Amino acid sequence: MIQVNDVLPMAHTDSSGDGEGSVQVHLDPRERLDGALVLAIYGKGGIGKSTTSSNLSAALARLGHRVVQVGCDPKHDSTFTLTKRMIPTVIDTLAEVDFHAEELRPDDFVFEGYAGVQCVETGGPPAGTGCGGYVVGQTVKLLKQHHILDDADVVVFDVLGDVVCGGFAAPLQHAERALIVTANDFDSIFAMNRIVAAIQAKGRNYKVRLGGIVANRAAETDQIDRFTDAVGLETMAVVPNLDAVRRSRLKKCTLFEMEETPEVLAVQETYTNLAKRLLAGTEGLMPEPLDDDTIFNLLGFD
């Protein structure tokens, strides 16, 4: 059996710079993304990153911008509300040509979705067999080789779960702004604090900075507000826990394609306003994460 790490070249690594004791995959200068606004969406697993990413991409495209969304999860379910299907992944497509990337054409791995959003799913190695970060790097290389990014105004990376390893932090090497999706609960905010730490580490060597927070499924934001006040972050958008969001996933469509009820119109406006704020430019934030005891004592009720 061919393993992913047998066919994807090892990128340059360095044991300094990203934190004591770390061995990180460093960005090949040839893979640097220039020209487009590059966003990386992070958050606790299952928090709604793909819903946020897809609706943000749709909003950006409806505002007249050329958008590429890259799903960075082996589950490859980031873009199905844009394309109405589970598209082939980069890694599966490469496997079909025995990893001879020169045999691929753009339409083998790039698929047009709602409002013209160009959709890509990296895929990944089978569980426990490799590092997804290498697949992200290979995907960016293919996109550049085939000039998919030449005309892009915005690139959105939708990234697996919270940051646990340098591999899945790889999109931070490309991004200008990172957004964190969180709910108003301890586990989500604890994960957010870990992501803040990862962005701080990557920000030492790369241009990535935090743009802000998207509160998702949030009737209240009191716990989120405690954290953002403590570390100096901003909540850029609040999406309440709406049944329309759940139904849009079941219908395999974005919220911009749903029947325009008052709640759907309101959440459409939320995503449109978020898109406009990001396009206008946001302050790049580099907050200091809290230590575990501090965040534990900060959140909750006495």
Image: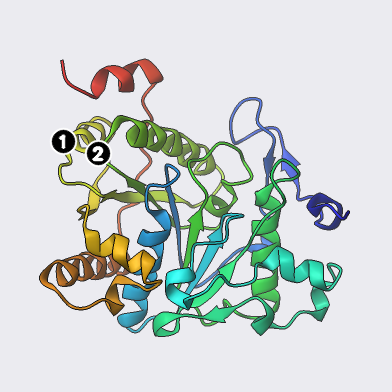
Give the residue type that dot 1 points to.
Answer: Asp
* Residue 60 screen position, x and y as percent: 34, 74
Give the residue type that dot 2 points to.
Answer: Asn
Up the image or down, 274 lies above or below 190; here it is below
Up the image or down, 204 lies above or below 101; here it is above
Q: Is residue 155 left or right of residue 60?
A: right
* Mark 1, secondary structure of its residue: helix
Residue drawn at the location 58% of the way across and 30% of the way down: 19
Indicate the quadrant where residue 54 lies: bottom left
Structural crowding at the residue carrying mark 1, measured as other residues with C-alpha within 10 Å and reported as few (<14), some (14–19) or many (≥20): some
Residue 184: image tag? 2
Contact check, label 1 and label 2, Cβ < 8 Å: yes
Up the image or down, 155 lies above or below 284; here it is below
Indicate the quadrant where residue 121 lies: bottom right
Front residue (pair 39, 99)? 99
Of callouts 1 and 2, the N-terminal one: 2
Structural crowding at the residue carrying mark 2, measured as other residues with C-alpha within 10 Å and reported as few (<14), some (14–19) or many (≥20): some
Residue, far left: 262
Q: Is residue 142 left or right of residue 10?
A: left
